């Protein structure tokens, strides 16, 4: 029983990464209608920027938590302005192919410079150590990850669902022309949305840096699962991606305890079942 | 007087040219071509990859770039850790590109796929990267040399010593594929034979980034030692997260396959205290230092990394191969293999002999990773705990029972010998 609690908590921690990443993907897909395959590579870039900042410029973890997502978001804005923008009137598939190509280029660049095994980012001093919960030892940093991720997810959800800016964003996805007629600068709004979504990936990258080895492949290991999360939650559904992210983390944690060899496949089995029963995903709606 | 000298000189010249003419016929296609088949961008690209290619090129250039008067060429390809890509590349190399020897093949799956192709075409394989003991056991071929290390040597070196030092109960975190299982089985056997107990194991899919749930299971088992039967990024993440969850130093980790490139990327603060077995350490003596610094400072070594045992082993094995061609007076596979097995190796990398099963038996080292305080200069990572003599380090010919070895010959398992 004790072991089970431990596994569930660990699952929740992983789930919060899934939630953070799938939230960014869902925002981008929902509002800009791009399937951003480069999300994993940008997550990795966020982690690497944090490491480079620490190693070369002495920028610590907490400033990096702000600066690195900003830099990644800026990179996203540049990509949107120079490349993605030209593909909006075409089929979704073109955006997917472009971002997939970008993934290969970004990963290749880091691979060339830092090799496959990457580098190790230390846990910030104030978050070192941990607490014994009785049923397991909870590293302080992991607790921090869960708290921050949930807070960020809720904030994003609140902005999009409950504020005026969010209302504009949602209106923009429904009917961009009409919104533009009301005097809202829709192209700018889309650029910023993409920057925000991508910035979230960079943010998740910095959060992950002290836990996982910072390496060029860290994004591609995770992104496939995250796509499954988005599909299960319903493409473009903000709340769906958060809830599904956390939920699947739990399911995965449970599998790792009950039958470890299936841990990497269980998410996809669930995805297949969900697609059969509810093609639009658990929280999605038919378009 | 002058006339005799002139005659002598003429005779010598004639003899020399006759020699080269004869040799020219004996080098197939007029060139000795070495193909480096390795993982250029995947999990193993830091411990093998471009560094492997560099080591082979250094061996060729130090040899003078020529053997028996004919040029030596090096080509390379990325097998992407896929057995089918590896065997197709090798087939093309042997059939069309005049490759005489394929080397490295890090990742046991690719090695086992290429060996029969090479044997069928009577070409040589020299393996430095792969680990499976079966390479010179049940799956051996007459044209193969397994040079640097194997699972048995790792299991034996680390397993036995750790048990001897009081680590007598084990739990395994194992990568769920052939390599991981074979490493776990080999180590578990050694642990039991040395009087230790195995309390359990958990098998994880390859490239899992999160190991916390496996580590919690290892923690709950109460084992003194957690054996990591995985490799590359998986091992790195296991070690890193074990420290995070406060598992080390209460329980200790035993790295069953850890390379110096892994320790370098982890950093000493995380890796310190860990035991591991290696065939080569750059800072062992004058000879190893001299060669390794040459490797490190080579203009093609972009990351200025010190060589791993796989890379150093490649330099040594390719040099041995070229010497065998020179001694045999031909690059014909049977003659070269006979010479390679007949002549002992004695260089900066190792001293030992290649057995009839193709396994190179040499000394191994049990080392412990230094703490940041103990490390005095860059790459000062290991304390040598023990030098494991060749006879103890590797399985014997009798244990391997290679079906291509005359003693254990089995025509069904070794169809290449007539």
Image: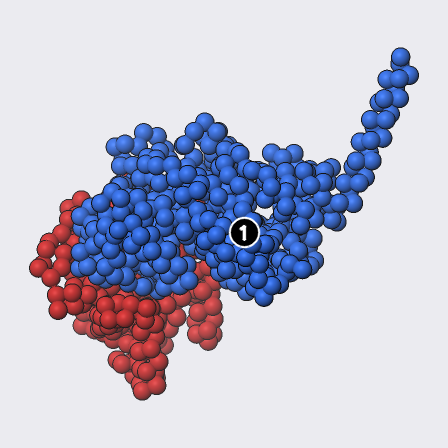
Chain colours: A red, B blue
Q: Residue furthest bottom?
A: A277
> B294 or A22: nearer the eye?
B294
Residue B66 vs residue A165: left or right?
A: right
Q: Residue furthest front?
A: B407
Residue A63, image x, y percentages: 23, 47
Residue sitting at 80 percent across and 40 percent down? Answer: B22
Residue B334 vs residue A50: left or right?
A: right
* SS type, badge 1: loop
**Relative to residue A2, is residue B144 depicted above or below?**
above
Residue B413, picture quadrant? bottom right
Residue B50 in sight in this render: no
> B65 or B184: nearer the eye?
B184
Identify residue for label 1. Answer: B357
Residue sitting at 43 percent across and 74 percent down? Answer: A92
Q: Chain of mark 1?
A: B
**Relative to residue B104, is residue B208 depicted above or below?**
below
Q: Residue furthest left?
A: A134
Residue sitting at 87 percent across and 25 percent down? Answer: B10
């Amino acid at each position: 029983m004790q072991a089970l609690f431990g596994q569930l908590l660990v699952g929740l921690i992983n789930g919060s990464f899934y939630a953070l990443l799938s939230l960014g993907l869902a925002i981008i897909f929902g509002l800009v209608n791009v399937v951003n395959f480069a999300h994993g590579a940008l997550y990795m870039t966020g982690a690497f920027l944090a490491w480079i900042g620490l190693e070369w410029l002495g920028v610590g973890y907490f400033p990096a938590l702000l600066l690195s997502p900003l830099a990644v978001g800026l990179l996203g804005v540049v990509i949107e302005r120079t490349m993605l923008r030209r593909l909006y009137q075409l089929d979704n598939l073109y955006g997917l192919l472009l971002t997939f190509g970008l993934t290969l280029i970004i990963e290749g660049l880091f691979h060339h410079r830092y090799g496959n095994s990457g580098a190790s980012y230390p846990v910030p001093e104030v978050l070192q150590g941990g607490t014994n919960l009785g049923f397991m030892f909870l590293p302080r940093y992991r607790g921090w990850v869960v708290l921050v991720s949930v807070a960020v997810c809720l904030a994003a959800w609140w902005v999009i669902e409950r504020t005026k800016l969010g209302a504009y964003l949602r209106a923009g996805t429904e009917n961009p022309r009409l919104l533009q007629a009301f005097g809202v600068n829709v192209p700018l709004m889309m650029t910023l949305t993409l920057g925000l979504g991508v910035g979230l990936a960079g943010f998740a990258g910095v959060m992950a840096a002290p836990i996982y080895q910072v390496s060029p492949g860290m994004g591609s290991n995770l992104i496939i699962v995250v796509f499954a999360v988005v599909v299960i939650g319903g493409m473009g559904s903000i709340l769906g991606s958060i809830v599904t992210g956390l939920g699947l983390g739990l399911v995965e944690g449970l599998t790792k305890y009950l039958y470890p060899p299936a841990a990497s496949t269980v998410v996809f089995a669930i995805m297949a079942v969900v697609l059969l029963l509810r093609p639009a995903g658990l929280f999605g709606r038919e378009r | 007087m002058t006339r005799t000298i002139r005659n002598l000189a003429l005779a010598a010249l004639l003899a020399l040219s006759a020699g080269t003419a004869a040799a020219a016929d004996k080098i197939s296609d007029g060139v000795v071509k070495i193909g480096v088949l390795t993982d250029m961008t995947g999990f193993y690209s830091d411990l093998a990859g471009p560094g492997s290619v560099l080591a082979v090129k250094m061996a060729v250039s130090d040899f003078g770039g020529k053997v028996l008067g004919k040029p030596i060429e090096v080509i390379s390809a990325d097998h992407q850790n896929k057995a089918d890509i590896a065997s197709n590349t090798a087939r093309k190399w042997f059939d069309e590109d005049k490759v005489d020897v394929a080397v490295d093949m890090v990742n046991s799956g690719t090695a086992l796929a290429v060996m029969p192709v090479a044997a069928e075409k009577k070409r040589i394989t020299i393996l430095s990267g792969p680990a499976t003991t079966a390479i010179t056991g049940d799956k051996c071929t007459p044209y193969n040399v397994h040079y640097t290390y194997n699972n048995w040597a790792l299991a034996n070196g680390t397993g036995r010593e750790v048990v001897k030092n009081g680590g007598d109960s084990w739990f395994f975190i194992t990568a769920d594929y052939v390599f991981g299982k074979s490493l776990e089985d080999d180590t578990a056997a050694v642990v039991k034979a040395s009087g230790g107990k195995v309390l359990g194991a958990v098998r994880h899919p390859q490239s899992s980034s999160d190991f916390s749930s496996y580590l919690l299971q290892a923690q709950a088992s109460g084992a003194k030692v957690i054996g990591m039967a995985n490799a590359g990024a998986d091992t790195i993440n296991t070690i890193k997260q074990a420290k995070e969850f406060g598992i080390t130093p209460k329980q200790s980790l035993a790295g069953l396959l850890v390379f110096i490139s892994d320790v370098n990327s982890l950093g000493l603060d995380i890796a310190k205290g860990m035991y591991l077995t290696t065939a080569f350490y750059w800072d062992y003596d004058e000879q190893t230092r001299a060669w390794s610094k040459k490797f490190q400072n080579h203009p093609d070594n972009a990351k200025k990394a010190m060589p791993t045992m796989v890379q150093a082993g490649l330099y040594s094995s390719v040099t041995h191969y070229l010497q065998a061609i020179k001694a045999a007076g031909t690059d014909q596979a049977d003659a070269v293999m006979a010479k390679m097995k007949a002549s002992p190796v004695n260089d900066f990398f190792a001293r030992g002999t290649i057995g009839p099963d193709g396994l190179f038996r040499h000394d191994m080292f049990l080392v412990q990773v230094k703490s940041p305080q103990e490390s005095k200069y860059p790459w000062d990572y290991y304390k040598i705990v023990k030098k494991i003599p060749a006879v103890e380090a590797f399985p014997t010919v009798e244990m391997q029972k290679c079906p291509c070895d005359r003693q254990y010959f089995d025509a069904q398992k070794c169809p290449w010998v007539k």
